[in-house]
Image (cartoon, helix red, strand yellow):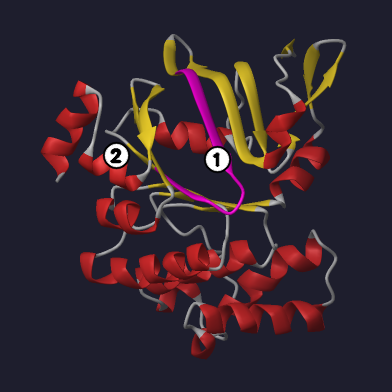
């Protein structure tokens, strides 16, 4: 339970609305008041050094981590809490699971079920959570496999696939739930360099289709080319944000300039 800080109804138009979000692990304060708004249909790339709070912030968006202060609304709903008498109360696990069904998340390390085929990995959640019929789930899964270029791998097991192929399956699995928002936590960081491009190409296609996406990444070329908003985090706060043109060519803060000078 925590005190509510609900913003105005205008926040409903954002895929993400975060205000003064704080998160600590014991004495270590990881998020120190994050403010960020991302509109539907936009792609936001979050950059920053290791330990800046990027992945923790992303995990808070799906209530994999609980925020301790502030306001966080994703896909039109307050994440993990409901408001009553100016206080926020944590939702029941079943209610949190329902919220997560609307937010797809792709992790660094794929997280596929190794004992299931590619097709089984994709149809499991739509059937068990959305109550989609097996016939419909299979048809939609095959469409998604075509989208990510892996139709021929439907009967394969994850262990027989390359890292890039596994990550593309993970993207298809997340899309099978028809999410309102896709979250990517450094989706290419565990891949060999020659496999990065095939995953980024799928993500480019999603962006072209108008999918709302928030991507924690070190792929600066992708951020420059695909994103509508580039966000730089450091020390648990948003230091600077803007269009790719602003961010890469007209950086305002000394901290952002120092970061870019080391990674470009």
Q: Position of residue 160 (x, y in %)?
A: 41, 79
The residue sitting at 73% across, 23% down in the picture is: 8
Query: Is residue 4 something one can see in this rendering?
Result: yes
Whether residue 43 appears in magenta in the rendering, the answer is yes
**Marking on residue 49:** none
Contact flag, marks 2 and 1 (Cβ < 8 Å): no
The residue sitting at 35% across, 48% down in the picture is: 217
- SS majority, magenta: strand
Marks counted in the figure total 2
Whether residue 17 appears in magenta in the rendering, the answer is no
Q: Quadrant of residue 143?
A: bottom right
**Residue for badge 2:** 247
Q: Identify whether 1 is placed above or below 208.
A: above
The residue sitting at 75% across, 36% down in the picture is: 77
Q: Identify whether 70 is placed above or below 227.
A: above
Q: Position of residue 238 (x, y in %)?
A: 40, 25
Q: Position of residue 118 (x, y in %)?
A: 56, 77
Instruction: Report the front residue among 112 and 148.
Output: 148
Between marks 2 and 1, how big is the CA–CA gap?
Answer: 16 Å
Q: Is residue 173 left or right of residue 225?
A: right
**Residue for badge 1:** 38
Q: Quadrant of residue 15?
A: top right
Q: Is residue 194 left or right of residue 133?
A: left
The mark nearer the N terminus, 2 or 1, is: 1
Q: Identify whether 180 is placed above or below 207.
A: above
């Amino acid at each position: 339970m925590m005190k509510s800080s609900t913003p105005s109804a205008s926040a409903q138009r954002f895929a993400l609305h975060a205000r003064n979000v704080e998160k600590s692990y014991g004495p270590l304060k990881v998020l120190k008041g994050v403010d960020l708004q991302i509109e539907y249909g936009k792609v936001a790339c979050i950059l920053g050094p290791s330990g800046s709070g990027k992945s923790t912030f992303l995990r808070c968006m799906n209530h994999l981590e609980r925020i301790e202060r502030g306001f966080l609304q994703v896909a039109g709903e307050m994440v993990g809490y409901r408001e009553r008498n100016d206080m926020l109360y944590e939702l029941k696990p079943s209610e949190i699971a329902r919220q997560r069904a609307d937010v797809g998340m792709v992790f660094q390390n794929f997280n596929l079920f190794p004992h299931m085929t590619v097709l089984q990995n994709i149809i499991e959640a739509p059937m068990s959570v959305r109550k989609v019929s097996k016939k419909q789930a299979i048809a939609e899964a095959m469409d998604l496999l075509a989208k990510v270029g892996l139709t021929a791998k439907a009967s394969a097991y994850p262990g027989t696939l390359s890292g890039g192929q596994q990550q593309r399956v993970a993207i298809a699995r997340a899309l099978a739930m028809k999410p309102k928002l896709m979250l990517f936590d450094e989706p290419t960081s565990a891949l060999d360099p020659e496999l990065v491009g095939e995953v980024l190409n799928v993500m480019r296609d999603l962006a072209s289709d108008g999918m709302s996406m928030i991507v924690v990444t070190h792929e600066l070329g992708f951020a420059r080319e695909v994103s509508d908003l580039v966000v730089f985090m450091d020390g648990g706060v948003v230091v600077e944000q803007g269009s790719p043109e602003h961010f890469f060519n007209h950086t305002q803060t000394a901290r952002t300039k120092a970061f870019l000078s080391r990674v470009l």
